Amino acid sequence: MAKIVWISPNDAMKYLYDNGNGKVYRQMMSWIDSKDSDLVSTGILAIGNFARNDMHCIYMVQSGLSKKLIDILATHNKKDVDTKIQHAVLSTLRHLSIPAQNKSKLIEENIVEVLYGMINNDYYPVIFKLMGTFRMLVDGQEASARALINKKEFIEKIIYWCYNSDHLGVRAEAPRLLVWLIKNSRSSEAYPIILSVSDSMKCLVDMISSLHTVMQNEAIIAITLISSYYFCSNDNKKMSTTMSEPDATSQLNNSNSKSHINSEYLADLLIAADIAKNVEFIIKKYHEKIAFETASNLVKLLSLLSNSIGIIEHFKNCKINDALTLLEKNKKIKELSSDISVLKTSFDGESKNEEV
């Protein structure tokens, strides 16, 4: 009687990989050296499927696979080349860049420079993989994140991808990449560059109303980091804003001087991006099931923003206190009640600090 043996996909992949000695894996490796581009892309994609866990990924990088893939990509990182190979290599490199110990090795192999050569690519499935690979690489890599975030051209590309693509993955990945650059650079040095790029804060603010909790929280953290730098430097005293909401966008877009970038400038950007509407949306939609971490981070952000008279008026016009009242009723975040109460007082127009 014949026996049927069922093994899970992961077990099957482990068996076929066999610590880099599996016949199927070795065959796929041989295809990488083929002159047939279809075989090359197929082989690379298949190898990417073997990169299903950290152990496999670490071995692949140690065995020199990553260097080989980066060298292939270096000859295929311009426009009007075989997009199948670009897509396959980026998919596999993204997997290989996930383990923490692989990141520095990949960076030493010049992956960042090779990837950067692709930012003018206009094929969005490739751009999606490109951004994902960048995002994995900068995680915990302060120097690389700082180098990238200080390139205004790169920030402009991220914002362009965010608002000029019909590829849903690209539009979701763009703000996440910007957030990870802000978070991992661990420096305020690039904040003026970010704020000088049109729609950069809008990109982050729009992410607040994402349907995914992780993305909501990431956006809140990124905006908090930037707001902390500009608002906390003013000794927590409320700041007036010089622009009305209708005029803010046009004036901000026409200003490229870093000397204009200060707390008032940031406040105007946030107002122009309609941060109140986005915050109100997630509170009203998720107030009953919002995670404590997200609620706590949101309260911290609102506390910072309440140092701007202009932003207070912006939130008052959106009737944010109605939303905060709903949030206050969530028993799972009861320990935030006093902070929420303080916020409601601020948005009612009663100053926490003496106005200047």
Image (cartoon, helix red, strand yellow):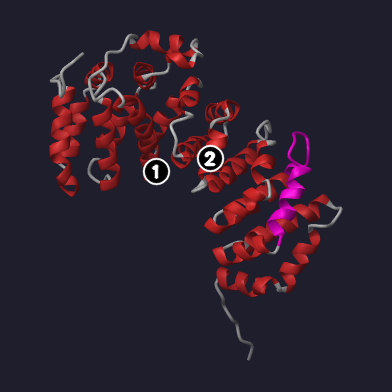
Question: Measured along the vertical axis of the image, is residue 137 above or below residue 182?
Answer: below
Q: Would you name the residue on which mark 2 appears?
A: 145
Question: Measured along the vertical axis of the image, is residue 58 above or below residue 297?
Answer: below
Which residue type carries mark 2? Ala
Q: Label 2 crowding class (10 Å Cα cut-off): few <14, some 14-19, many 20+?
A: many
Residue at position x 18%, y 23% in the image: 347
- Which circle marks residue 287 in the picture? none
In the rendered structure, are the residues bearing label 2 and label 1 in contact, judged by CB atoms less than 8 Å apart? no
SS for dot 1: loop
Q: Label 1 crowding class (10 Å Cα cut-off): few <14, some 14-19, many 20+?
A: few
Q: Would you name the residue on which mark 1 appears?
A: 212
> What is the CA distance from the residue labelled 2 to the residue labelled 1?
24 Å
Residue at position x 62%, y 42% in the image: 130
On the question of residue 95 being in view, the answer is: no
Residue numbers of the magenta segment:
64-84
The reply to whether the magenta stretch includes residue 78 is yes
For the C terminus, the image quarter is top left
The answer to which quarter of the image holds residue 51 is bottom right
